[in-house]
Image (tube, rainbow, N blue to C red):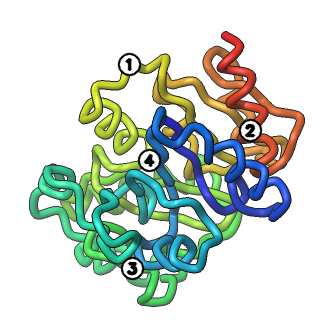
Amino acid sequence: MIATDLDGTLLGDDGALAAFREWLGGRRERLRLVYASGRSAAAVRELVAAGRLPEPDAVITDVGTEIHVAGPGGASGWRPWPGWLERFGDWSADRVRLALAGYPGLEAQDPVHQTRRKASYDALQLEARDLASIRQALARHGIAATLVYSAGRFLDVIPPGAGKGPAARFLAEAWSMPARDVLVFGDSGNDADLLASGFRGTLVANALPELDAVVGGDVYRSPLTFAAGVLDGIRFWSGR
């Protein structure tokens, strides 16, 4: 199973992406391809329908709050993966938005980036103490949540138990994939839990410094960028 972030990881170098597509072509029947993105399912579908990305077996979207499975009819046949959204019960991002309305330093992103399970903000240069303060503010309203901060400016507030890493584990279990057979790839903070999930991970060379603490153990830092780094990571782990 290959689970890869899109922006800044698989996307960013069209030539390298073409090489990835060529590599994948002769091996498609032997692996599961998963996109793990902060984008919405609709946005990822557009990339696939336009021919920019190969058809996946599943997509993890909205920072790991949704999983869709590919179905008949290509991208138009995607449907929610049963059992994933149900894990989050009545958790509502509307409550988060109300609790954090007017919170200093947080600017709600456009409605297109907001979902029932994800409250998204622009928030520049938050530090650990700032994130702790936001958690406390949510706790005062009785809200438990996971905070995902990336690129020094994007904050997503999602349900406990959501995220790219938990979603990838959910799929690996559904497909009876042992951890050693799961390769994961990323470049920014919203990939941290994916890379720290016990799978065989790769950081592409253009990864942001915020992921430096993740490197080690089961994480390989490729000297190559974007999709070339993904291919390099596949070769690295295949040799082991």
Q: Tell me, yes or no, whether the two marked residues, 4 and 2, touch with CB atoms within 8 Å.
A: no
Q: Amino acid at mark 2?
A: Leu
First of labels 2, 1 by sequence position: 1
Q: Which residue is disc 1 drawn over?
A: 178
Q: Residues within 10 Å of mark 4 (few under 14, many from 20)?
A: many
Q: Is residue 80 left or right of residue 86?
A: right
What residue is shown with label 2?
Answer: 231
Residue under numbered circle 4: 164
Q: Nearer the viewer, mark 3 or mark 4?
A: 4
Residue 70, horizontal then vertical, whole percent: 34, 60
The answer to which of 43 and 192 lies nearer the viewer is 43
Residue sticking out furthest to the top? 240
Mark 2: few, some, or many residues within 10 Å (few <14, many ≥20)?
many
User: What residue is drawn where x is 71% and y is 61%?
Assistant: 11
Percent coordinates x, y for residue 31 in the rendering: 47, 35
Q: Which residue is mark 3?
A: 114
